[in-house]
Image (spheres, rainbow, N blue to C red):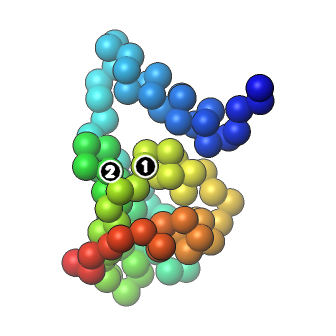
């Protein structure tokens, strides 16, 4: 059976987290090359994603799976990815 990209990303991520020889990453912050979004910070312990927009407004998205953060980071268009997969999730305006 052929695995989907999502399954492969999730399996790779699980292998990294479960490897006892590696330090567990708790938070990761990336600068975003987007007309609307300036910064993304993901918390691996709480599965929360904080997005900072160029107007300095911040939004906290809950229940963001790690593979979704990886998908966002590797997306051809981060803005399109966020609009399609992240914005529908529960959020809090900070």
Q: Which mark is residue 47?
A: 2
Q: Which mark is residue 88?
A: none
Whole-percent x, y for residue 13 in the image:
48, 32
Is residue 15 left or right of 47 when viewed as pictured? right
Q: Secondary structure at mark 1?
A: loop
The answer to whether any part of residue 73 appears in the image is: no
The vertical placement of 16 against 90, above or below, is above
- Residue that extends furthest to the top in the rendered view of this protein: 21
Which of pointers 2 and 1 lies earlier in the amino acid sequence? 2
The vertical placement of 93 against 68, above or below, is below
- Residue that extends furthest to the left in the rendered view of this protein: 94
Whole-percent x, y for residue 7 in the image:
61, 36
What residue appears at the point 35 percent right and 56 percent down from the top-left corner?
63
What residue appears at the point 70 percent right and 39 percent down from the top-left corner?
4
Along the line of sight, the residue nearer the viewer: 52 or 47: 47
Whole-percent x, y for residue 71 in the image:
57, 51
Along the line of sight, the residue nearer the viewer: 9 or 36: 9
Q: Secondary structure at mark 2?
A: loop
What residue appears at the point 65 percent right and 66 percent down from the top-left corner?
77
Q: CA distance from mark 2 to mark 1?
A: 6 Å
Is residue 9 left or right of 90 when viewed as pictured? right
Along the line of sight, the residue nearer the viewer: 84 or 28: 84
The vertical placement of 24 against 62, above or below, is above
Cβ–Cβ below 8 Å for labels 2 and 1? yes
């Amino acid at each position: 059976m052929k695995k989907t990209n999502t399954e492969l990303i999730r399996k790779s991520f699980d292998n990294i987290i479960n490897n006892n020889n590696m330090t567990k990453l708790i938070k990761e912050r990336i600068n975003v090359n987007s007309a609307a979004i300036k910064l993304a910070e993901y918390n691996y312990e709480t599965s929360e994603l904080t997005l900072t927009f160029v107007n300095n407004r911040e939004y906290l998205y809950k229940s963001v799976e790690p593979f979704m953060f990886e998908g966002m980071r590797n997306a051809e268009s981060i803005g399109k990815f966020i609009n399609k997969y992240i914005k529908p999730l529960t959020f809090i305006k900070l």
